[in-house]
Structures are given as C-alpha cells and as structure tokens.
Image (cartoon, rainbow, N blue to C red):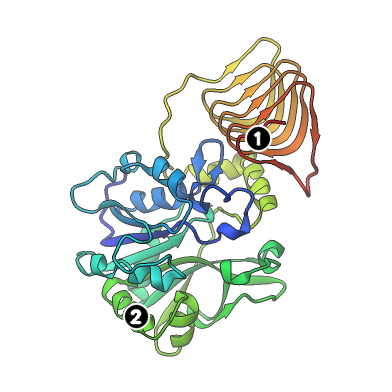
Amino acid sequence: MLGTNANALGIIFPNNYDGLIPELTNERLMASVPFGSRYRMIDFVLSSMVNCGIDNITVLVRENYFSLLDHLGAGREWDLTRKNGGLNIFPPFAQKNQGIYGGRIGMIDSILGFLKSQKEKYVVMSDTNLALNFDFEDILAEHIKNGADVTIAYTKEELPESVMKTDDLKKAMYYTLDLDGNAVKKININPQDKGVQNFSMNIYVIERELLIELINRAFIAGGVYFERDILGAQVDTLKICGYEYTDYVARISSLKSYFDENMRLLEDENLEALFDKSPIYTKIRDDNPTRYVNGASAKNVMVADGCVIEGEIENCILFRGVKVGKGAKVKNAILMQDTVIEDGVDAEYIITDKKVHITADKELKGTDSFPVFIAKRQVV
C-alpha cells in the first residue's frame, strides 16, 4: 500500500452493466466476474483506490452479491479492516422502507446518513466493468486545480457495437461527452454515433457536501439516473470537467469483449501496462504451485496456482485449480476456477465458468467471433 492520504472516500457500484454479459452474471454481479487468471473485476478499481490512499470505501450492492461478499470478506487483502472507514458493504433493504435501487440516485440516497457523518472532503465513484490501474490522485489533483464541481473520466475510443445494440439500454446506459477544452458542454445518453467519441468511464469526482445536496434534491424530484437527472440536467449551472484517461483499460461490454480483453493479456506489453504501475490485490487462496507433468506442453499462457497440466495448452487463460488431462489439447480458451478437462479432449475457443467438467474425448470448437460458453458446474 502506498500510504498516501487522498482526502476522499470511494463509492463503488458493482451491479451496473450486469446485463451486458448475462452469461457470466446469472449467479454473480459484474464486480465478481473473474478476469486475468486470478482476479475479479472489482479488484482493479478497489486496488486503485487503496493505492491512492483512499481507505474509506463503500460498495453498494443490489442483487446476486453472495459471490462478492465471499470474495471481499472484511477487506483484509486490501488493508481495509479498520476501526474507522475501511470497507463498507451496503445491500438493498439495509434500512427501513428501502427497496431495490433503481439507479445511482436511489443507491446514493440510501446512504446519505452515512455520507453526512464522514469527514472526507471529496467522493470518487466508479463502476466495475473496467479493468485498469487508475491514478485517483491525479484525477483529484485535476479536479481541484480546475475548481470543478464534478470531474468525469473518459477515454477517446469508438463505441462498442455490443453496447449500442443492447436490447434494454436502460439496464446498461452509456454516455459520451461534448467538450470545449476540458469543459463538458453536453452529456449524450446512449448515442449511436460512429467514429471516435469521448466515452465516459463512469468515474466521477465530486465534493461530498455537494453530492449530498444534489442527491437530496434529485431524489425528492423523482430522479433516478445520476448522469441524466443531475449532471445532464445541470450541465449549464454546474462546472463539469472532463479528465482524459490514456493508460491501459479493458472495458467489458459483451461476452466477446470479455474473451478478447483476457486474451490481450497474453501480450507482454498489455500485461505490463495493466499490472506494473501499482499492485492489484485479490483474495488469497492457499494452493500448491501449478504442476506440469512429463509430456505436458504450454505455449503463450497465463496460469494461476493450483493447476495440474498433463496435456497441451496454447493461448489460454487458466484460473486456480484447473486440471487438463493427458492427451487433451486446449487452445484459445479461458478456463475458470476448478475446471476439469479430462483425457483426450480437443477444445478451442471456449470459455468455461467455475467447476465445469468436460469428460474424456469430447470435441468442442468455437470461433474467434463466437467463443463457446459453458455455464457454471456443467458436465459436458
């Protein structure tokens, strides 16, 4: 831990964008989707906050959060087991007359009492569909230097087709920014524009007392979405600034993008860009080192601990406890925790969820544009 003091508290929204990858969020939320051989998606933004000295972090869960609670525990791996501050997880129904949150405004309104009792001057907020190593100290410094009311982080990139073609955009709203210098002049909601856009990362910096005031007014007026009902509606009265993020980021917007972003980590420059700037912490699982049995072959792979490899693996991401049997050939695959591949299996372009069992001599072939997904605990 870097041990600096950012004078900010963090709020993380782990359920937003669950609808973009329903295959992986049927029994979990976006925040606990496995990524990069041993991590969960929340590890990246949570570690980034901790590395920048933010030690008071709230996670506002909505549904399917058992796996996230199991992963985070008391926050020990992130040094967040503290008497004051630390890791706070707020489920729905935590307070009397509280229902399931409809949007960011309702979620924040549910913890207004908590926010009022805190001492930090600033609040940083983020979703968990991004794997990145974010410098929150830098965006805070820019926010203060600009005298901004709100700062929004964005990347310059084309909008993914998977986002624009989502069946129910209300469940996965996305935003682009019209900028004059670094001043946000308009927030576009679910645009269909082609070409490079200022694509919001849904990472925000705002003063805590201003956030409380804005949420109070918006909630009373029936507002639901922070971006639409607060920022977009007051873009002429609030000083909203953009902060361009130019470092490595993996944005998960579909099962295909999930596959592609994992596979990008097999290239050294991408792996270094994501992990070398500052450490990414995750839940510890005590396990044996991975064992490669005589005759095994491994080419261009990322393999976690606890695996046993007897066959051939190439261009693969293996999570903890995976077993690949003798004579099996696995190529261009993501095998999640405790997957078992028996002898003689021939598999290519597949994604297995946790504890999948593929029996002997099976042949499974997806394609680069359509990897085959096998759901959790399935036996093939």
Between the C-alphas of marks 1 and 2, the distance is 47 Å
Vertical comparison of 61 with 192: above or below = above
- The image shows residue 61, relative to residue 300, as above or below, that is below
Quadrant where the N terminus is found in the figure: top left
Residue nearest the observer in this picture, 139 or 58: 58
Quadrant for the C terminus in the image: top right
Residue 266 spot, x, y in % from top left: 64, 38
Q: In this view, does 125 lie to the left or right of 368?
A: left
Residue under the image location 57 percent in, 73 percent down? 175
Residue type at the position of mark 2: Leu
Residue 48 at x, y = what percent?
A: 40, 51
Query: In the structure shown, which secondary structural element does the residue marked by tag 1 occupy?
Result: loop
Query: Callout 1, which amino acid?
Result: Gln
Report which quarter residue 147 is drawn in.
Answer: bottom left
Question: Which quadrant would residue 119 be assigned to in this image?
Answer: bottom left
First in residue order: circle 1 vs circle 2: 2
Mark 1, residue position:
378
Image location of residue 87, percent across then percent down? 30, 50
Q: Pick the residue in front: 198 or 346.
A: 346
Q: Nearer the viewer, mark 1 or mark 2?
A: 1
Q: Which residue is drawn at 48% across and 42% down?
A: 276
Q: Where is residue 233 in the image (x, y as percent from the top left)?
A: 47, 86
Residue 332 appears left or right of 238: right
Examine the rendered structure and indicate whether residue 273 appears above or below residue 96: above
Per the image, the residue denoted by label 2 is: 214
